Amino acid sequence: MPLLDRKILFFGGKGGVGKTTCASATAVEASRRGRRVLLVSTDPAHSTSDIFEQPLGPKEREIEPGLFGLEIDATFEARRYVDQVKQQIAELFSPAILKEASKQIEMAATMPGVEEVALFERMSELIVDRDDQYDLVVFDTAPTGHTLRLLQMPEMMTAWVRALSKTRRAMLTEDPGPDPVLTALEARRERLQIVRARLMQARVAAFVLVLIPERLPIEETARALDTLASSDVHVAGLIVNRVLPDQLDGAFLGARRRQEQVYLDEIERRFARLPRLRLAQRESDVHGIGQLEAIGREVSRLA
Ligand SMILES: Nc1ncnc2c1ncn2[C@@H]1O[C@H](COP(=O)(O)OP(=O)(O)OP(=O)(O)O)[C@@H](O)[C@H]1O
Ligand SMILES: [Mg+2]
């Protein structure tokens, strides 16, 4: 299935292998083909602003006609998330209980993991609610581990919400009618299931793993593939980036190329069942729409 026919693409891989470059190039190519595209950076160390040479931030911004960019700010989202929870609670409890509850929520807000939850909430919103606004949403992710954890979160949270609902139900003695807390929890669980279902549909969502022909990125890719397989997220293929071009000579490059060939062979062997695409090492680093266009045309052939 052609890469650009999907609605949601994630670009993952080890640090510095070319995730942002490939994600941005793909977004440019899709918008050139007339699709309405949103490029989302979830990496706290954002670099989509740098590559497009224009400021992007927590609100969607048009980079060029049909192409929008967004850099999720996890701290900002965590604040918004906590305020939202407080507001929901305000509607449920008396002022006395509310004061105590607010204190506890503020305390919980500083716990590790809250930013991750908030980031995932924001991603869910983009995955589920923006369906009619964009033809394609491209996620430029942080180095692998983090993103894969985000993908497993719907399952984790579903289990968590279920356990909470059970405790809550046990606490209710007589039939008090509909319980607002349970209703809210149920709504959250249903929403997570929608996200999960979307991410598991191969025609809708897929992951592209970027690597370079070196030892550590190969191992990281193998691990990422295991994790993705266990969370039933489809892998569209691998992009093997920064492959030395043929027309170079010199003793140093000769040695380097022999080393590279060992790893290229290993990639062919170990990842034979997946579509693969090679991108050449370029003379200079990549920025600006012109260069992204050229790379985007190549990347779109991954199928
Ligand atoms: N094929 C290539 N030829 C030359 N330079 C490249 C190529 N691909 C990527 N680069 C350069 O390598 C650097 C890292 O690329 P990029 O930022 O896309 O990687 P990343 O995986 O997003 O990194 P991070 O994990 O830090 O987010 C950038 O300076 C980019 O311009
Ligand atoms: Mg990056």
Image (cartoon, rainbow, N blue to C red):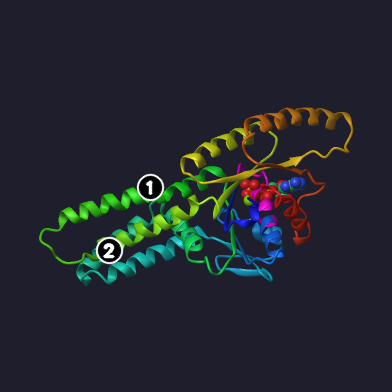
Q: Is disc 2 surrounded by few (<14), some (14 to 19) or many (20+) residues within 10 Å?
A: few
Contact between labelled residues 1 and 2, with CB atoms less than 8 Å apart: no
Any magenta on residue 198? no
Residue placed furthest toward the front: 1
Residue 212 in percent (x, y) is at: 69, 39
Of residues 283 and 183, the one nearer the viewer is 183
Residue 22 inside the magenta-drawn segment? yes
- Whether residue 112 is visible to the viewer of this picture, yes or no, is no
Which residue matches tag 2?
183
Answer above or below: position of 10 versus 182: above
Point 50% across, 52% down: residue: 201
Check residue 156 in the rendering and tell me which mark sits there, or answer none.
1
Instruction: Give how far across and how far down residue 298 sits, in percent.
Output: 75, 50
Decide which of tag 2 and tag 1 comes sooner along the chain: 1
Residues in magenta? 13-25
Residue 6 place in picture, x, y as percent: 59, 56
Residue at 30% over, 63% down: 184
Horizontally, is 272 left or right of 178 in the view? right
Q: Tell me the quarter of the picture where residue 27 sits.
A: bottom right
Residue 228 can be seen in this image: yes
- Report helix, strand or loop for mark 1: helix
Q: Position of residue 134 (x, y in %)?
A: 58, 66
Q: Is residue 236 left or right of residue 54?
A: left
Amino acid type for the residue under numbered disc 2: Thr
Q: Residue at the location (21% across, 55% down)?
A: 168
| 90 lies left or right of 8 | left
